[in-house]
């Protein structure tokens, strides 16, 4: 069961998410509020697997980081408006958000994304944002600072980072390395600490900038 909390001021968006999830098995909405000021409180009070927030939450990056620090078991998905604020979205990802989602239109796309997010994956739906991220990574490829950080990793942590950057789930990384998921989680925690990253997405960017993956 994937528990979901929704914090979004647009009733059409929040009701659309609720309607889609209520018709699906394996999902349960534990909170739904239009009050964007309550995003942190909702995360702490309900501890959902996934917190779906509006891109317009005040101090989005700070709120994202606070939620990740206080409720580490909660993954954060940001729902954009039709026009994506690229900088705000990038800052949210850097602060620890797991996903940037398009407004809910196709039930299958939303439920698939939420399952991936709950499994620890990173999902970026807006094509324009993906193109921007790729462009920035390309511009800073083989960045010396990123290379220096990656050099701090052990051989096994390097392997874990490579698999993370390619989008593998914890279960698939464990299978590829013939270790337990618990061990993978421990490796990922150390990788994020050594790379000074708040999220898997940020670590993936370091992997590309350092040449770990191309």
Image: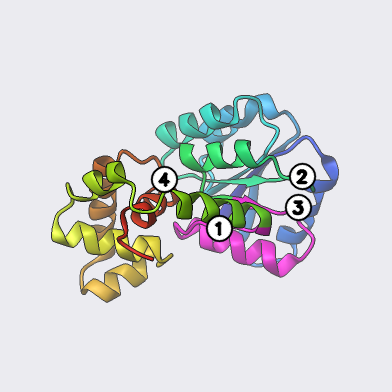
Magenta-colored stretch includes residue 104? yes
Q: Mark 3 points at which residue?
A: 103
Q: Mark 1 points at which residue?
A: 123
First in sequence, mark 4 or 1: give its number.
1
Labels 3 & 2 near each other (Cβ < 8 A): yes
Question: What residue span does the magenta drawing correspond to?
Answer: 100-127
Q: Residue shown at 59%/31% (left/top)? A: 60
Q: Where is residue 117 in the image (x, y as percent from the top left)?
A: 52, 57
Q: What element carries label 2?
A: loop
Q: Distance between the residues labelled 3 and 2?
A: 6 Å
First in sequence, mark 3 or 1: give its number.
3
Q: What element carries label 1?
A: strand
Magenta-colored stretch includes residue 65? no
Q: Distance between the residues labelled 2 and 4?
A: 23 Å
In the foreground, 110 or 202:
202
Labels 4 & 1 near each other (Cβ < 8 A): no
Check the picture and name the quadrant holding the N terminus.
Answer: bottom right
Q: Residue shown at 56%/42% (left/top)? A: 90
Q: Name the residue under label 4.
A: 199
Q: Name the residue under label 2.
A: 81
């Amino acid at each position: 069961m994937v528990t979901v909390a929704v914090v979004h001021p647009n009733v059409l968006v929040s009701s659309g998410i609720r309607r889609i999830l209520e018709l699906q098995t394996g999902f349960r909405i534990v909170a739904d509020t239009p009050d964007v000021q309550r995003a942190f409180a909702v995360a702490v009070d309900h501890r959902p697997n996934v917190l779906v927030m509006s891109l317009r939450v005040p101090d989005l990056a700070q709120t994202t980081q606070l939620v990740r620090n206080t409720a580490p078991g909660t993954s954060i998905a940001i729902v954009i408006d039709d026009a994506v604020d690229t900088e705000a979205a990038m800052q949210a990802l850097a602060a620890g958000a797991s996903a940037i989602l398009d407004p809910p239109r196709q039930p299958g796309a939303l439920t698939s994304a939420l399952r991936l997010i709950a499994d620890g994956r990173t999902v970026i739906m807006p094509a324009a944002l993906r193109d921007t991220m790729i462009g920035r990574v390309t511009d800073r490829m083989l960045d010396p600072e990123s290379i220096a950080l990656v050099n701090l990793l052990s051989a096994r942590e390097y392997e874990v980072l490579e698999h993370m950057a390619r989008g593998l789930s914890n279960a698939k990384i464990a299978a590829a390395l013939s270790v337990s998921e618990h061990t993978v989680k421990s490796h990922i925690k150390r990788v994020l600490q050594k790379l000074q990253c708040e999220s898997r997405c940020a670590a993936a960017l370091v992997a590309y900038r350092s040449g770990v993956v191309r």
